[in-house]
Image (cartoon, rainbow, N blue to C red):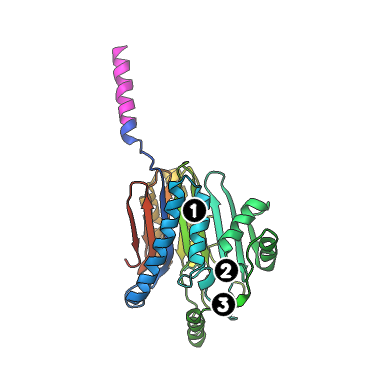
Amino acid sequence: MNNLLSLLLIFAFALSLNAQVRLEYAIVIHGGAGNISPTFISPEREKEITDKLSEALETGIGILELGGSGMDVVEKVIRILEDSPLFNAGKGAVFNHAGKNEMDASIMDGKTLNAGGVTGVGDIKNPISAARMVMEKSPHVLMMGAGASEFANANGAEIVDSGYFHTEKRWNDLQKQLANDKLEKYGTVGCVVLDKDGNLAAGTSSGGMTNKRWGRIGDVPIIGAGNYANNNSCAVSCTGHGEFFIRYTVAHDISALMQYKGLSVEEAAYEVVHNKLKPAGGSGGVICVDKHGNISMEFNSYGMMRAWANSKGEMGVKVFD
Ligand code: ASP
């Protein structure tokens, strides 16, 4: 009997060593990955970017401190980035081949596995809010173009004239790429959160690629590719060459490696970004948070604009490697 008791005690002790303490909350934000290096970004622009990421981060922390839901944080944070011309989403969305903006967004609730997305929308001021409406106010997961706008409008989303998305910089980028017959990736924004209730949420929003044509859709609105959240594993938001993120189902693959293979969030993100995507030629990065509040920000490009914080008071904002 004594032996059995000692065995049980040893087992319980071993379990407690292995069990991770869950942080109250954690949040990670990205503003896109790619050719983000001091060669391409001036110190003034770097400061503008870090200021905006900090503002978004502080907003997210404020809601989390008060016990707000991860879904609310993801939507509010992404709206701030969508309203800024600095990032390729919402106001700063890139132009397609025809000189129009076609935006994508998606959001996912890790508790229920409910998700919503919009694709190819050109007049919704904040596509992330429309994505949430699709999730919460329709029986569907993904809506496109004019139909998505009609639905969002009927549910109270702000609809704007297409001129709202016209920024000089993005227009000039399109002219350059038209002249060189190039198609380039240009960032995206995203946010992943663990809230005080232990729920995970993820959101991603993008203008896609400059000079895209034929109704090209990237990974951003596709659940499991550019966005995924599951309370049993992690929340993931991606940025990079969308075609690769779709083919490698990047966001879900990270979750699956954790769930089925027992990898940590850092190991799973590293495996997918460096050992799968990179050899295949897929450049970009991911932000992830797991159910304990551990985070990962892996990228195989020059840089990724990112910001992070947790309830232990750890935080940071970075643009370059
Ligand atoms: N993933 C986005 C797309 O392919 C672009 C990016 O994140 O850079 O549409």
> Does residue 225 appear anywhere in the picture?
no
**Residue 38: in magenta span:** no
Residue hosting label 1: 73
Query: In the image, which is nearer the foreground, mark 3 or mark 1?
Result: 1
Quarter of the figure with residue 95: bottom right
| Residue nearest the viewer, comparing 136 with 61 | 61
Vertical side of 32 occupied by 8: above or below = above
Task: List x then y, in percent, for residue 137.
Answer: 66, 52
Identify the secondary structure beneath mark 1. Answer: helix
Which mark lies nearer to you, 2 or 1? Answer: 1
Q: 315 left or right of 105? A: left
Residue beneath disc 2: 103
Amino acid found under the numbered disc labelled 2: Met
Q: Is residue 4 magenta?
A: yes
The answer to which quarter of the image holds residue 166 is: bottom right
Upstream in sequence: badge 3 or badge 1:
1
